[in-house]
Amino acid sequence: MQPREAAEYIARERPELKDRISEVWKNADPVIENIIDASRAKEVLGLEFTDWRKTMLDAVDSVIAIEKEWKAQGWVPPY
């Protein structure tokens, strides 16, 4: 996963958050990716790995849910 790719994915999947994505991530240079073969972990341990896209959206959705709860209790965000 590249930072720019993640920023574009979040903006596409959660357009209401588009303006809140870090400019650093939006303009990040590509980084070297490590490719891991997880077939042995699945074979021996039965582990299934979650795609980064699902993980990213689950995390974003969790943070937004917490933010909504805080706002309901009177918190005013700094942005």
Image: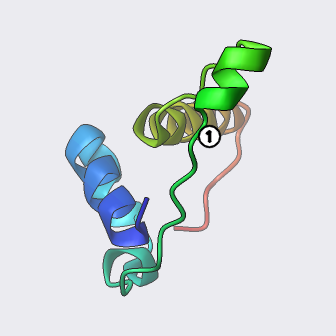
- Residue 47 visible from this viewpoint: no
Residue that lies at the very extreme toward the right in this rendered image: 45
Q: Left or right: 23 with respect to 52?
A: left
Return the residue nearer the eye: 37 or 15.
37
The residue that appears at 70% across and 47% down in the rendered structure is: 75
Where is residue 71 shown, x and y percent of the image?
63, 38
The residue that appears at 61% across and 36% down in the rendered structure is: 38
The residue that appears at 46% across and 34% down in the rendered structure is: 51
Mark 1 burial class by Cα count in 10 Å: few <14, some 14-19, many 20+ = few
33, above or below 44, in the image: below
Q: Left or right: 8 with respect to 57?
A: left
- Residue 32 visible from this viewpoint: yes
Where is residue 13 shown, x and y percent of the image?
26, 39
Where is residue 36 shown, x and y percent of the image?
57, 50
Return the residue nearer the eye: 74 or 44.
44
Q: Left or right: 16 with respect to 25?
A: left
Return the residue nearer the eye: 55 or 64.
55
The residue that appears at 43% across and 69% down in the rendered structure is: 3
Return the residue nearer the eye: 32 or 66.
32
Quadrant in the picture for the N terminus? bottom left
Q: Please state which amino acid type lies under the numbered disc 1.
A: Val
Q: Left or right: 31 with respect to 37?
A: left
Q: How is the model colour-coded? A: rainbow
Question: Residue tagged by mark 1?
Answer: 63
Total tally of numbered discs in the picture = 1
